[in-house]
Amino acid sequence: MADQAVELNNEFSRNISWDKILLNVRDNKVFMGAGALSVTAERQRLVNFTRLISRQPYCMLVVRPRELSRAMLFTSPFTTATWLCIFLSVAAIGPVLNWIHRASPFYEFRGDVRRRGGLNSVTNCAWYAYGALLQQGGAHLPDADSGRLVVGTWWLVVLVLVTTYCGNLVAALTFPRLEKTIGSTEDMIAQRDQVSWGFFRGSPLIDHLKTASEPQFSLVLERGQVHEDEADALSRVRTGTHVLIDWQVNLLQLMKKDFNECGRCDFSIVKVQDFVEENVAMVMAQDNPYLPIVNQEIRRMQQVGLIEKWLQDNLPKKDRCWSSSVVEANNHSVNLGDMQGSFFVLFFGFLLAAGLILLECGWRGWHSAKEKKVIKPFVT
């Protein structure tokens, strides 16, 4: 029996198929198939399964999402609609403040003489609103309560906007923005025109998909590709247009193997919530009288934690490629890549100021040339 076990182990090291193991156990050529065999109804008709050893979840191996450009990081705290509303509010508050200031009878009752400039100018009111948004204020303030109420309300709005912007900007600097990746079966199916998926030949997932009644599982099986070679499957996943579905422990082994060979972290693991976890057990012949004894020993090893310890000892150790769904905050030092957007704004401001000063010089030259053509009377 020991010779048979050694022979089977050598065959297994040469990628023996699970079907051959089942046939050897069924024909009593070996005492036990000590491997991670999934429990299926079809296999239960051939052999007996021992007590469950573990449950293996199905996961998707996808390309690790890359960090997005941070050139426009300063705009990320607000959405496009929010920015549009802010611009419209700044553009509207100037004319509103000017109209209320000019329509108020307070100044006529007090006997003030209306002068040009100050809040009587729409331009000055607009610049005041813009300065308040930058928390700078302005040189002109209304004396009437109606105008003061408008200014006070605008400052409350500015306070909320600035506080929210600063808080979200700090969060955007702390947590990197990553490319959107596939996170579920629905995402994978929704992107079926751009992304393909597959599984290894002999995977028990194929049998589960064949018997599943949900339409999405039928689509996964219909458009799924069967892989024969690990290297080919990983190369396709690395392109970002393919997804590999398998047990989590198998995908972890593939990631560790690829990291040892290439030294890069190109992959990430996403747990599939839609697929049921696979029950894993060993197999024995149907007429084997030692099945209750083996189940009792497995139960004792589970109670003392031996199986869990063996599993942890043989799983790949955590490294810098270890995939996690939780993003951890760290002390991120702000670099030039984070602040390049602010320099873009500064450069744009300089260009706009240069354009305006050229426009002002052109307007002055045109106005001076026009004045020279006008014949003025000589006054002594």
Image (spheres, rainbow, N blue to C red):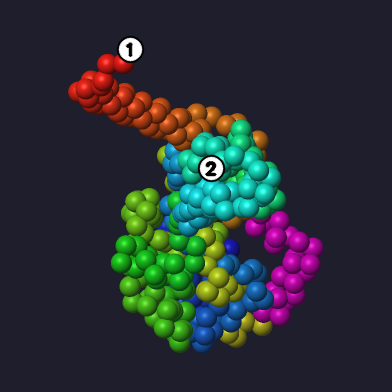
Please report the bounds of the magenta region as a residue range.
Answer: 291-316
Question: For the residue carrying disc 1, how many other residues have a C-alpha within 10 Å: few (<14), some (14-19), or many (20+)?
Answer: few
Reply above or below: 218 against 152: below
**Label pair 2/1, CB-CB below 8 angstroms:** no
> Circle 2 sits on which residue?
120
Q: Is residue 279 in sight in this rendering? A: yes
Image position, residue 115 (x, y; %): 54, 37
112 or 141, nearer to the observer: 112
Q: Is residue 363 left or right of residue 36?
A: left
303 or 295, nearer to the observer: 303
Residue 107 lies in the magenta-colored region: no
In this view, the residue farthest toward the top is: 380
Question: For the residue carrying disc 2, how many other residues have a C-alpha within 10 Å: few (<14), some (14-19), or many (20+)?
Answer: some
Q: Earlier in the sequence, mark 2 or mark 1?
A: 2
> Circle 1 sits on which residue?
380
Q: Is residue 169 left or right of residue 308?
A: left
Disc 1 element: loop
Tell me the kind of residue under disc 1.
Answer: Thr
Q: Is residue 137 left or right of residue 196?
A: right
Residue shown at the point (75%, 75%) measured from the top left: 296
Q: Quadrant of the C terminus?
A: top left
* Separation of residues labelled 2 and 1 (CA atoms): 38 Å
Image position, residue 154 (x, y; %): 63, 49
